Amino acid sequence: MMTEAERLDYQHPHATEVDDSSLEVSIGGEVREFRKKLDMTVAELAKASGLSAGMLSKIENGMTSPSLATLRALSRALHVPVTAFFRKFEEELDATYVRAGQGLAIERRGTRAGHQYQLLGHSVGKSVAVEPYLISLTEESDVFPLFQHAGQEFIYMLEGELNYRHGDKTYALLPGDSLFFDANAPHGPEELRKLPIRFLSVIAYSRDSE
């Protein structure tokens, strides 16, 4: 039976050919390097992180996009921060270029059913973390105006219409509208008025708050 972390990984599309400069390959290389530094076998790390040896092998070879839950499990097993897996990728690139539809699909803490997050970039090794996302909502998406997390968030509507709650106020958002707010207050989609809905979300927070 698959663990929850493995199930999330199987939801992500796999590429049959992977560019050596891709994020997945870079993450896999870091995982392998940290594993070897601890003199661990694939089987030992798989057991420590709650993954199957087959899934871990796919991650190390850049054949799958690991979810945030999986990266956290690996970081605990390897005794390194999650950001360490992105280190070499950031050292090699001073910009992150993501083709349409190729953002890294991840599961954020508190993600609701039907909320599709694609990570479009990231900052590593800085005191302030910045995470840009493309968020898609469909008829299968839950409404959930109770997200709370550290930092500030900026959203920009691309398609569809929704009512978005922040604290005790609700904002009707149409394409071209934007909203910038303190993310510590409860917030999120309250009513999906016109589907499908797509919007950009940029979250910034201090790494001290992680």
Image: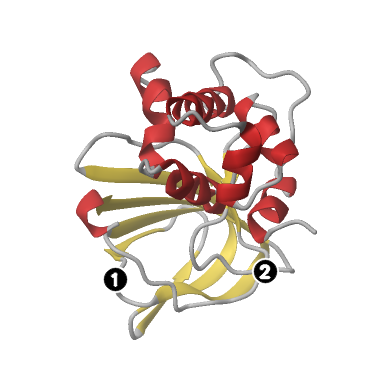
Q: Mark 2 to mark 1: distance in Å?
A: 23 Å
Q: Which of the colour schemes (rainbow, by chain, secondary structure, one colour) is used? A: secondary structure
- Of residues 27 and 116, the one drawn nearer to the viewer in this rendering: 27
Q: Is residue 135 left or right of residue 210?
A: right
Q: Is residue 209 left or right of residue 123?
A: left
Mark 1, other Cα within 10 Å: few <14 / some 14–19 / many ≥20: some
- For numbered disc 2, what is the local secondary structure? loop
Mark 2, other Cα within 10 Å: few <14 / some 14–19 / many ≥20: some
Q: Where is residue 56 drawn, in percent x and y?
A: 65, 37
First of labels 2, 1 by sequence position: 2
Q: Where is residue 88 drawn, in percent x and y?
A: 40, 21
- For numbered disc 1, what is the local secondary structure? loop
Dividing the picture into quadrants, the one containing residue 80 is top left
Which quarter of the rendering shows the C terminus?
bottom left
Residue at 63% across / 54% down in the picture?
A: 5
Q: Is residue 89 above or below residue 179?
A: above
* Labels 2, 1: front one: 1
Q: Is residue 150 above or below residue 199?
A: below
> Visible in this render: residue 100?
no
- Of residues 70 and 144, the one drawn nearer to the viewer in this rendering: 70
Q: Which residue is mark 2?
A: 141
Which quarter of the rendering shows the N terminus?
bottom right
Mark 2 in CB contact with mark 1 (< 8 angstroms): no
> Visible in this render: residue 42?
yes
Residue at 48% across / 46% down in the picture?
A: 77
Please state which amino acid type lies under the numbered disc 1.
Asn
State the mark number for residue 184. Answer: 1
Please state which amino acid type lies under the numbered disc 2.
Ser
Residue at 54% across / 54% down in the picture?
A: 69
Q: Is residue 62 above or below residue 159?
A: above
- Of residues 175 and 107, the one drawn nearer to the viewer in this rendering: 107
Dividing the picture into quadrants, the one containing residue 177 is bottom left
